[in-house]
Image (spheres, rainbow, N blue to C red):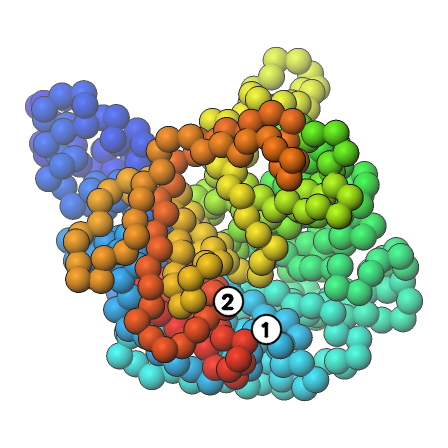
């Protein structure tokens, strides 16, 4: 292989996935030097470490893209934003609904048929630019309006409304103009639901060509191919209070508080039947006598159909952290926990299921002791929660200190050291175990020890403003203050 010209060797190596590429650097000196000295190969590896995929580079040299990536990584390690802008927009605490997807913040005002969007992608590309919100008329009867979601990378807005009893109506519009989406065969779909569903218990999820409507009470999931206007699958999980999330456009996660808590991984066939296959169940820790899980909320970053407009990088769909906000109760005592699981763990059980030699394969049932201690991180939490506090492999948590940012980073690049600066953050790489011990107000019958590595960074914001809610986007943090609900502060990294 040493006889291969360097330019041909680098072309061959560029066909490998990043993890294999790193392994190849240990094969021999020639391969190591080729990988080390070729910007294209270094770029592939560094993107992978940050859980990113290449986006639109505007024909920039690879060395410049690599330098930008390193600067961005260091900015997140230090929680050091390059600019801070205050923007007038309807408050996310008092709105009807909001979404933060694909570089766009969208707020649907309470009591008014307005749909207000803020293009954060413009700030991320050029922090010196001035941005303003765009207000569009929703043209939907607010009395029947239930929820919305969007994927700006596909210019897709999905609006869910209630028809008469037992019927729901999904509209497929463009984010840019609220017009019927040109790639949707039909502008809307009407489907039947159980009349027992509660107001606010329905939510919309988008994963490329699929749109799901999940019902919390009673648990049910409707999955549509939005471009074909067809129902692909109708899932009825046992029990109530089951949360839903896409793992990919052909895999999903159902999380139930029953049986002391369980995660079910399913796949969806790509044919017209839309067959749903249960591949694995992952158990949560055993609870002590008298305790039960009363609520589970599941959060993760969005799955976008395309790369974001004008962004150098986009979060890879295989590099997501899943955040579970769990409430345990016993009589009048409540205990809150936050559990973090990486996408690679859930994806591995899909591979294990299909590697089984038996026909048909049987669903894998995994006790907590066989996966939880090594594959998760559980921390004691509190009651505070909100939508879109997770993006890619980062989580922004509520802090007990006013005007401070607390970020957890589960990416491979998190292990690097920050560069010392004048505004030194409280920073710690957590590699050792954390344990929640059993006691009178703990729900567990034995110690729960978890070891998934992450970096915890807490930094004070040098401002007089006090934020009580933060949203997380690929290149921005959004701070909101309930005392001043008609503006939002954007921190651009």
- Where residue 384 is drawn, which disc sits there? none
Pointers 1 and 2 in contact (CB under 8 A)?
Answer: yes
Q: Is residue 200 left or right of residue 326?
A: right
Picture residue at 33% right of the left edge, 75% below the top: 463
> In this rendering, does residue 454 appear at all?
yes
Q: Quadrant of residue 196?
A: bottom right
Q: Name the quarter where the C terminus is drawn.
A: bottom left
C-alpha separation, residue under disc 1 versus residue under disc 2: 8 Å
* Residue tagged 2: 469
Image quadrant holding the N terminus, namely top left
User: Residue 93: which numbered mark, if any?
Assistant: 1
Toward which corner of the image does residue 259 lie, by quadrant?
A: top right
Please determine whether, in this image, residue 73 is positioned above or below residue 82: above
Q: Nearer the viewer, residue 280 or 325?
A: 325
Where residue 210 appears, as percent x and y from the top left, is: 63, 53
Image location (x, y in percent) of residue 101: 50, 64
222 lies left or right of 374: right
The answer to which image quadrant residue 257 occupies is: top right
User: Is 216 drawn above or below residue 375 in the view shown?
Assistant: below
For the point 17% across and 53% down, the residue is: 420
């Amino acid at each position: 292989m040493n006889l291969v010209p360097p330019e041909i060797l680098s072309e061959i190596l560029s066909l490998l996935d990043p993890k294999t590429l790193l392994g190849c650097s240990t094969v021999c000196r020639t391969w190591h030097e080729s990988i080390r000295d070729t910007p294209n190969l270094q770029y592939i590896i560094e993107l992978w470490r940050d859980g990113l995929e290449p986006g639109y580079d505007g024909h920039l040299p690879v060395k410049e893209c690599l330098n930008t990536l390193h600067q961005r990584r260091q900015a997140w390690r230090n929680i050091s934003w390059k600019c801070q802008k205050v923007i007038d927009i309807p408050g996310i605490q008092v709105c009807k609904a909001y979404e933060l997807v694909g570089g766009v913040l969208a707020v649907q005002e309470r009591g008014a048929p307005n749909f207000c969007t803020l293009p954060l992608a413009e700030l991320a590309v050029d922090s010196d630019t001035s941005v303003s919100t765009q207000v569009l008329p929703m043209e939907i009867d607010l009395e029947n309006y239930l929820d919305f979601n969007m994927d700006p990378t596909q210019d897709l807005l999905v609006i869910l409304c209630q028809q008469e009893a037992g019927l729901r109506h999904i509209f497929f519009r463009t984010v840019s103009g609220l017009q019927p989406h040109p790639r949707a065969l039909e502008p809307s779909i009407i489907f039947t639901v159980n009349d027992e569903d509660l107001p606010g218990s329905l939510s919309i999820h988008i994963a490329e060509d699929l749109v799901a409507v999940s019902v919390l009470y009673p648990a049910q999931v409707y999955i549509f191919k939005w471009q074909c206007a067809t129902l692909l699958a109708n899932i009825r999980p046992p029990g109530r209070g089951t949360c839903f999330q896409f793992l990919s456009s052909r895999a999903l996660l159902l999380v139930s508080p029953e049986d002391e808590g369980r995660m079910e991984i399913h796949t969806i066939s790509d044919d017209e039947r839309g067959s749903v296959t249960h591949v694995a169940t992952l158990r949560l820790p055993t609870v002590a006598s008298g305790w039960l899980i009363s609520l589970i909320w599941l959060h993760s970053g969005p799955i976008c159909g395309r790369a974001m407009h004008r962004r150098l990088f986009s979060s890879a769909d295989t590099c997501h952290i899943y955040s579970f906000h769990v409430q345990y109760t016993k009589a009048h005592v409540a205990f809150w926990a936050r559990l973090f699981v990486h996408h690679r763990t859930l994806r591995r059980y899909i591979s294990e299921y299909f590697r089984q030699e038996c026909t048909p394969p049987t669903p894998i049932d995994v006790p907590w002791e066989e996966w939880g201690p090594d594959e998760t991180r559980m921390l004691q939490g509190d009651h505070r929660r909100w939508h879109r506090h997770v993006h890619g492999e980062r989580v922004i948590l509520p802090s007990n200190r006013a005007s401070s940012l607390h970020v957890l980073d589960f990416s491979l690049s998190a292990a690097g050291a920050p560069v010392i600066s004048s505004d030194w953050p409280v920073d710690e790489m957590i590699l050792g175990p954390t344990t929640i011990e059993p006691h009178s107000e703990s729900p567990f019958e034995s110690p729960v020890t978890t070891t998934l590595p992450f970096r915890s960074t807490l930094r004070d914001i040098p401002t007089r403003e006090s934020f009580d809610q933060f949203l997380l986007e690929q290149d921005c943090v959004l701070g909101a203050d309930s005392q001043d609900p008609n503006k939002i502060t954007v921190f651009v990294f």
